[in-house]
Image (cartoon, grey):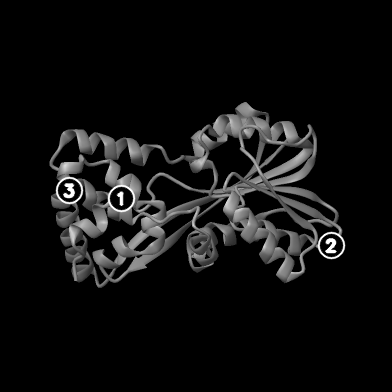
Amino acid sequence: MTPEPDQITDPSADIDLADPAVVDAYDELPLWSALAGQLLLRHVPLAPRLVALDLGSGTGFPATELAERLGPGSMVCGLDPWAEALGRARRKARIRGVAQVTFVRGDGAALPFADGSFDLIVSNLGVNNFADPAAALVECRRVARTGARLALTTNLQGHMAEFYRIFRSVLDSAEAQRALDRHIAHRSTLDRLHGLLKAAGFEIVRTAEETAMLRFADGAALLRHSFIRLGFLPDWRDLVAAEDRPAVFRRLATALDAHAAAAGSLDLTVPLAYVEARA
């Protein structure tokens, strides 16, 4: 059933990340982080007695998992500006009995650590969300010891291309189409990411790519999904003038449903990359 436009276009329906109940339920939304987190955990260098930083640790993944995999001789610090999430991360680590992880509130572009503090820095899906990725990577180099590794994952341009192709087809405003193109282009490419890392003082060690899949039964399932409403829908709404949103999103939902009916489901590809660099 196609959702009513006001269920999609009304900003009052946004998820409030400062609501403690939302934070407690956030672990119900792990699949986005897990898509790239598994890629990170397959490749990240592991050794005893490392001091590590997880930049953009959210409610504790992958910081707590990394701390457990590095073992009790290591220490992992998770950093995030989301204050409510840090409380949940600390509670989870305490319940799991992981003493070698701590959580600090902070900004990736102004890290609250001394120069040369870390042997390993990780970031899972963070680089696209940093307000200033170049500044954050320069800060990572500052707090990295000589020879330290930076390991990050990111989704790349081409992310959910099936959705964006359909979205563009229902936009009848040239201005909205240009806004959509800018929205798509903000995601990284490997060349761009390599350039940022080199400019920050890192040497690229290795890169691994893979393609993940998000699947939905139809457009209504996609547009009502809690993580889509949290992470994507607000930006999608902002691409369209307020007075045009009900009509545009009605057409979008119908077009997504038609695509899903023809294909058997609504399958969205997510190109992912793991990049490891040396300070």
Q: In this view, does 132 lie to the left or right of 57?
A: left
> Which three-letter amino acid code belongs to the residue tagged 2?
Pro
Q: How far apart are marks 2 and 3 (CA)?
A: 53 Å
Instruction: Locate the N terminus by quadrant.
Output: bottom left
Query: How many neighbours does mark 1 have within 10 angstroms: few (below 14), some (14-19), or many (20 or more)?
Result: some
Instruction: Locate the C terminus by quadrant.
Output: top right
The picture places residue 208, in percent across and down from the top left corner, at 57, 51
Residue at the image position 48 percent from the left and 61 percent from the top: 22
At mark 2, the secondary structure is loop
Of circles 3 and 1, which is in front? 1
Of circles 2 and 1, which is in front? 1
Q: Which of 8 and 194 is in front in this view?
A: 8
> Which three-letter amino acid code belongs to the residue tagged 1?
Pro
**Residue receiving disc 2:** 72
**Residue receiving disc 3:** 169
**Residue receiving disc 1:** 11
The picture places residue 157, in percent across and down from the top left corner, at 40, 44
**From where the camera sits, is residue 254 visible?**
yes
Q: Which of 184 and 272 is in front in this view?
A: 184
Q: Is residue 129 left or right of residue 173?
A: right
Query: How many neighbours does mark 2 have within 10 angstroms: few (below 14), some (14-19), or many (20 or more)?
Result: some
Of circles 2 and 3, which is in front? 2
Residue at the image position 25 percent from the left and 64 percent from the top: 219
> Which three-letter amino acid code belongs to the residue tagged 3?
Ser
Q: Distance between the residues labelled 2 and 1?
A: 45 Å
At mark 3, the secondary structure is helix
